[in-house]
Amino acid sequence: MLTYHLAAAHAHAPAVVYVHGLGGSSSNWWLLMPQLTDAFDQWAFDLPGFGDSPPSPPHSVEAYTADVIAFLERFDQPVHLVGNSMGGLIDVLVAATRPDLVATLTLIAPAMPQRRLPSAARAMAFVALPTVGERLMAQVNGVSAEDQVQRLLRVMYADPASVDDEDLAVAVEERQRRMTQPHADAVLLEALRSIVGQYLLPAGRSAWRMAGRVVAPTLVMVGGHDMLVGAWSSRKWRRLLPRSRVVELASAGHVAMMERPDVVAENMRAFVAAAHDADIRRPLRGHAGEAGRGA
């Protein structure tokens, strides 16, 4: 896995490891990471088949979970594990199966199975159908990288117009590079179908059952305008992990770490600081300010 490392400003800072979502890469964290260099030694990587990492089948939630565990085993101490979307789902499985590797868990719009799906999530499930996905991906590839990025922004962001020209140019360049990779579509569809497969697991093996086994202090952030993971999922997290901190970001979509990196950084700081308190096992109140409601 290709790794991006942003060293901390001081020695002995605790390590943070970021796991991106479906179709993403380590670049998804580049706006957030500079805001936390004073507090953390930060690591982000491209999962196999995404970003600049070569494919390494199978490209599934289970295989990626094993990849993340192998990466975390390199560290001398448990890390602060952070994940977005599919990366959040993977991190839940990692924290549940290897609690010795995880100091805290931060989930940003984790792609957990839901009965109630937002509109964009229903469309993604349709793309996962056999042969349908291949045909739709071929159609998408007939559209320019600029148009593809604009379409993605409308799904991922609460306010697509908030993306400045420089960040937009970087996204277009990355999309163009992705379009030249012969494995890109196959990897994305394989991973997407694996996520859908998580919805079909029996209750005893479900990701939610695994989440109930997580012992690490957990922060969950959901966007008020998330078209892939509905904000209503916050209620389930509060019931499942009453000692977690659940924050609804009223002005964010699916990728809050890109759209509102300042707010995500603020919440991460407060959460990790609280995790060091002796009374971490008591319910935590959400961080005040723009984040809105918390529990």
Image (cartoon, rainbow, N blue to C red):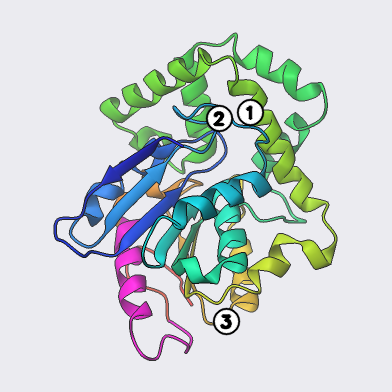
Q: Which residue is mark 2?
A: 49
Which sits in the foreground, 282 or 153?
282
Note whether residue 260 is visible: no
Whether the magenta-drawn stretch holds residue 292 is answered as no
Residue ID for mark 1 = 187
Q: Which residues are magenta?
A: 263-284
> Where does label 3 land, which residue?
242
Disc 2: CA contacts within 10 A as few (<14), some (14-19) or many (>=20): many
Residue drawn at (71%, 55%), measured in percent from left and top? 113
Q: Residue furthest top?
A: 142
Q: Residue at x 75, y 33 (%)?
A: 128
C-alpha distance separating marks 2 and 1: 6 Å
Decide: is 50 above or below 114: above
Q: Are dots 3 and 2 in contact, CB under 8 Å?
A: no
Q: Position of residue 180 (x, y in %)?
A: 50, 12
Q: Residue at x 38, y 39 (%)?
A: 3
- Mark 2 and mark 1 in contact? Answer it, CB < 8 Å: yes
